[in-house]
Amino acid sequence: MLLIAGVLGTLLLAVAARYGYHRDELYFRVAGRHPAWGYPDQPPLLPLLTRAVTEAFGDTLMALRVPAAVFSAAGVVVAALTAREMGGRRRAQLLTAASYAVCPFVVAVGHTFYTATLDLLLSTALVWLVVRWVRTSDQRLLLAVGAVAAAALNVKYLAGFLVAALIVGLLVSGPRDFLRRPMLAAGAAVVAIAVLPGVLWQARHGWPQVDMAGEIAGSGDFAGRPGFVPFQILMTGILPSWLWIYGLWRTYRSDGLRPFRFLGHAYLLLNVVFIATGGKPYYLAGLWAALWAAGAVEIERHGAPRGWGWAATVPAYAVTAVCSIALTLPVYPVKWLADTPQPVVNADSAETVGWPRFAREVARVHRTLPPDERARATIVVGNYGEAGALDRYGPKLGLPRAYSGHNGFWYFGRPPDTGGPTIVVGPDDVAEGARLHRYWTDVRVAGRIDDGVGLDNQEQGKPVWVCRGQRASWTQLWPDFKSLG
């Protein structure tokens, strides 16, 4: 399993610096310099961790990508350990580790330092600890579960659903004696202490995370509710997906896996909850390793189901690995990317291309302003990725600080009232730009974003506006610019 983890980690490091930052990485860079107990779209841990990494190792793309690769490689080991706790020997551990390592979702998030990267490792580790506790009854593990859950909840509040589902699963199928253990109370206290500051921040700011959840549910990503289960199969790999499906079934059918039936209950419950609430398929990713492990243990003990032996072979996993790499990692020359299926299958890859050119176009527009206006110009952009890109590349281009009303950036401050023009990147076309007349009397297109490789991402083709004649102060206007998404 260490070899498999090492291969995955080495592969991720080899391509770590290709293309560029993801918009979330650019956002976290700035959010980490505005430390808070919470943000409208997330808990505080990832921004703070991003700041720690960049302070320690430099403000570079590679500095962020190394931890991402390490997290994913560590997940391979945790997955194999989960199989061992279920009674799996060498073959089961290797099969589980391989399933995790070639999983398209694991490979994709291992390339980028964002919320899902650490959330996947922590949620997988959380499930592993619960499985270990079921096997050993070592009460100290309940405290460890509490510590990992506390960290997971400070990465993504959705970890609370996983914790609740595991508890329900244990209450339904046992063992139930964890309720009488003092270490459970200690673990719960750790969780409460860790999440209380973030909960208080949310309460003071009107629970923006709840509004954010509503925006996510209404986005229709991954084909909405009808696509919830099918996209799990795609995200786990069409070939390896049979193993976790088999593992799920065997938790209900195998006497050897009866102690771990709670995993099946937790998985099915979370499917119901997230389908009902419009969640995303990868919200269940923390349980995939345990279900792979259950399937692998059954194959080791009893052999593969008739007709499925080929799917547990090296060639099958090699094919999946090649497909995962081709569909998720930056292995193509960037000028070819738009002509590959990768941006359709993994839209995040398109979000890592074009940020330096984006900043240069805004700087070009800024330079066209007369000197007296240029000195007083402000910049407002439509989303946190754009604001983060200008924070990263703008200073060397002579740009002033960029502002945005999107998610956490709205809380980082409003533009100053300089009396000068505002360069705006936000409305996607001239028709949408008409609404800018609500805030300025003179609105003109002065440029257009082009990533240079014909890649259709969120910024491609956006007009860059120069707006003059501001109708009110930023104190009055800024509430209108607040947005979540």
Image (cartoon, rainbow, N blue to C red):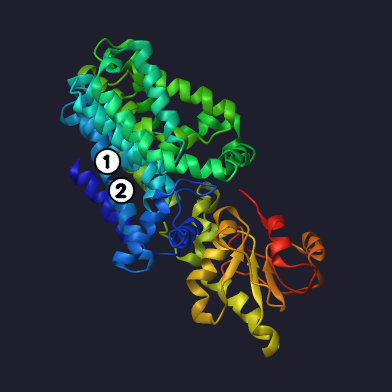
Q: Is residue 427 visible?
A: no
Amino acid under label 2? Answer: Phe
Amino acid under label 1? Answer: Val
Q: Say the numbered circle drawn on residue 49.
A: none
Q: Is residue 59 visible?
A: yes
The residue carrying mark 1 is 76
Mark 2 residue element? helix
Rate crowding at label 1 as few (under 14), some (14 to 19) or many (20 or more) other CA atoms within 10 Å: many
For the point 42% across and 39% down, which residue is it?
Answer: 196
Task: For marks 2 and 1, give the one nearer the viewer.
Answer: 2
Using residue 426 as the reference point, say whether residue 326 is left or right of it.
Answer: left
Q: Is residue 332 above or below residue 223?
A: below
For the point 60% across and 66% down, which residue is it?
Answer: 403
Q: CA distance from mark 2 to mark 1?
A: 9 Å
Residue placed most toward the observer, 116 or 339: 116
Specify the quadrant that holds the N terminus. Answer: top left
Measuring from the top left, give residue 55's x and y in whole percent: 33, 66
The residue carrying mark 2 is 71
Mark 1 residue element? helix
Q: Is residue 197 above or below residue 68?
A: above
Measuring from the top left, give residue 44's x and y in whole percent: 43, 49
Which quadrant of the structure image shows residue 20?
A: bottom left
Q: Is residue 119 above or below residue 404?
A: above
Residue placed most toward the observer, 405 or 36: 36
Q: Is residue 145 above or below residue 327?
A: above
Using residue 63 as the reference point, say whether residue 116 is left or right of it.
Answer: right
Q: Earlier in the sequence, mark 2 or mark 1?
A: 2
Residue placed most toward the observer, 279 or 94: 279
Rate crowding at label 2 as few (under 14), some (14 to 19) or many (20 or more) other CA atoms within 10 Å: many
Measuring from the top left, give residue 161's x and y in whole percent: 45, 29
